[in-house]
Image: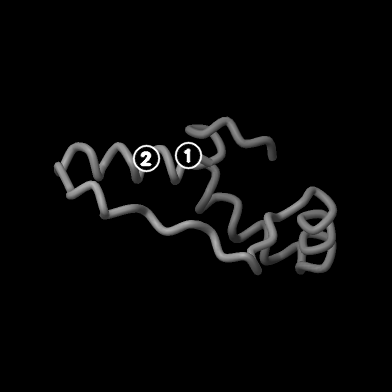
Amino acid sequence: ERLNADANYVLEQVRSPSFVRFPERQSWYKPVTAEMLHYYLCNTQHRLIKELLPKYILDFSLFAYPL
């Protein structure tokens, strides 16, 4: 969520030259919408979701993502 701000912070910290910039998003990039997420989750096997959830549950907790 903060990729640009974090990248700029890192560039400042390493004192990169002013012409070095983090690349802009490509024009073809489409952010994931709630509808897309719903579509993918509804079309993913429940077994797979149950296997993945324990692997990512800490991320959900740390970054306050809703389940």
Residue occupying the point 60% across, 51% down? 53
The numbered dot on residue 35 is none
Look at the image and tell me in which quarter the C terminus lies: top right
Q: Is residue 67 above or below residue 38?
A: above
Identify the image quadrant of residue 50.
bottom right
* Spatial CA span between label 2 and label 1: 6 Å
**Mark number, residue 2:** 1
Q: Nearer the viewer, residue 31 or 27?
A: 27
Determine whether 1 is above or below 46 in the image: above
Q: Is residue 15 left or right of residue 26?
A: left
Q: Quadrant of residue 47?
A: bottom right
- Residue at 35% in and 45% down: 7
Image marks 2 and 1: residues in contact by CB distance under 8 Å: yes
Residue 1 coordinates in the image, percent (x, y): 53, 41
Label 1, secondary structure: give it: loop
- Mark 2 highlights which residue? 6
Please provide percent x and percent y for residue 65: 61, 36
Asked if residue 19 is positioned above or below residue 63 in the image, the reply reads below
Expressed as whole percent of the image width and height from the top left, the position of residue 18 reads: 23, 47
**Please, what is the three-letter code of the amino acid marked with disc 1?**
Arg
Q: Residue furthest left?
A: 15
For the residue marked with disc 2, what is the amino acid?
A: Asp
Task: Classify mark 2: helix, strand or loop.
Answer: helix
